[in-house]
Amino acid sequence: MNITFETEVSRGQRFEFGRNWQNFLQTLSDERIIIAEQSMIGMLGLQDLAGKSFLDIGSGSGLFSLVARRLNAKVHSFDFDPFSVACTRELRSKYFPDDPDWSVEEGSVLDNDYMESLGNFDIVYSWGVLHHTGDMWTALDNAASKTKRNGILFIAIYNDQGWKSVAWRNVKKCYCSGTSGKMIVSAVFFPYFFFRSLIKSIVSGENKFTGYKRKRGMSIVHDWIDWLGGFPFEVASVEATSHFLKERKFSPRNIRTTKGNGNNQFVFVRETDN
């Protein structure tokens, strides 16, 4: 296991995303996989990825690496969290055993030597990951550098909400600080999230608990845990992220924004060679 990862967790500097993903995999179904697949197709505007190489930076549960492989891409997945790596390997073993076109490794997007060793890809994907590295802009720069000319960069970054984002950062830091912090944050926010979703379900006439999986095939409870514990935590505005990528000769293809706590999603195309 990565000693740096263990050290950061023990110091309260990092949430164990992979353990949450291990629990999520117990809920994974064919329906969730299909929903996730359709969400990727919708953002990329591509029905098939045959002949394309796909880099999944921070593969997490491995669900979207699986989706890319199902769409016929040649996939390379990596994650800093060893438990996330184990999740991704579990999905590969289950759905694509001994597949030479899907590799899974432990690595960091902030490790320049590792990133340099990977080469470049037709599609670079990092959804909700770069803002958890502890050095978001360097991570985004490194991710962008792995995109081929005319290749696609698909990322999601937490929306900058000013003082609200600062407050949430403190909540997450408290959650990761130890058992007491985790218990306090959970005791306050899980009832809040539950009753908020319950009220929304009643008002809208739509079950927000079971219907949540329509958002990329995700699980509402596991996303609550991910949100509360997700530390390190950084944010960026749509404008700041777009400007950063345009400076690196990327042009926008598809941008989906949020006004709340969630992620702004960006699909950009690289105009020039590295």
Image: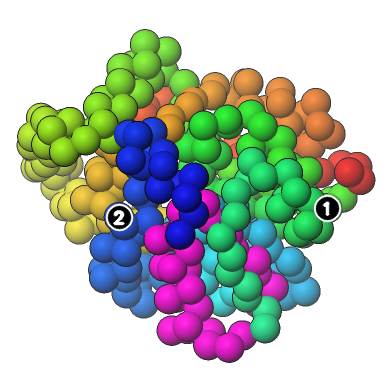
Kindly identify which residue carries mark 2: 20
Residue at 73% over, 44% down: 112
Q: Give percent across and percent down for residue 56.
A: 60, 58
The vertical placement of 266 against 60, above or below, is above
Q: Give percent across and percent down for residue 84.
A: 43, 60
Classify residue 34 by image quadrant: bottom left
Classify residue 107 by image quadrant: bottom right
Residue at 58% over, 69% down: 104
Does residue 166 show up magenta in the picture?
Answer: no
Q: Give percent across and percent down for residue 131.
A: 51, 34
Secondary structure beneath disc 2? helix
Residue at 79% over, 51% down: 116
Task: Name the foreground residue: 87 vs 227.
Answer: 87
Local packing at callout 2 (Cα closer than 10 Å; few below 14, some 14-19, many 20+) is: many
Residue at 26% over, 52% down: 222
Kindly identify which residue carries mark 1: 148
The amino acid type, in three-letter code, at marker 2 is Asn
Disc ID at residue 192: none
The vertical placement of 39 against 14, above or below, is below
Q: Give percent across and percent down for residue 156.
A: 53, 41
**Can see residue 136?**
yes
Residue farthest to the bottom, as pictured: 98
Name the quadrant of the C terminus: top right
The vertical placement of 74 against 42, above or below, is below
* 33 sits to left or right of 119: left
The amino acid type, in three-letter code, at marker 1 is Lys
Task: Name the foreground residue: 24 vs 86.
Answer: 86
Cα separation, mark 2 vs mark 1, equals 33 Å
* 200 sits to left or right of 123: left
The magenta stretch spans which residues? 72-99
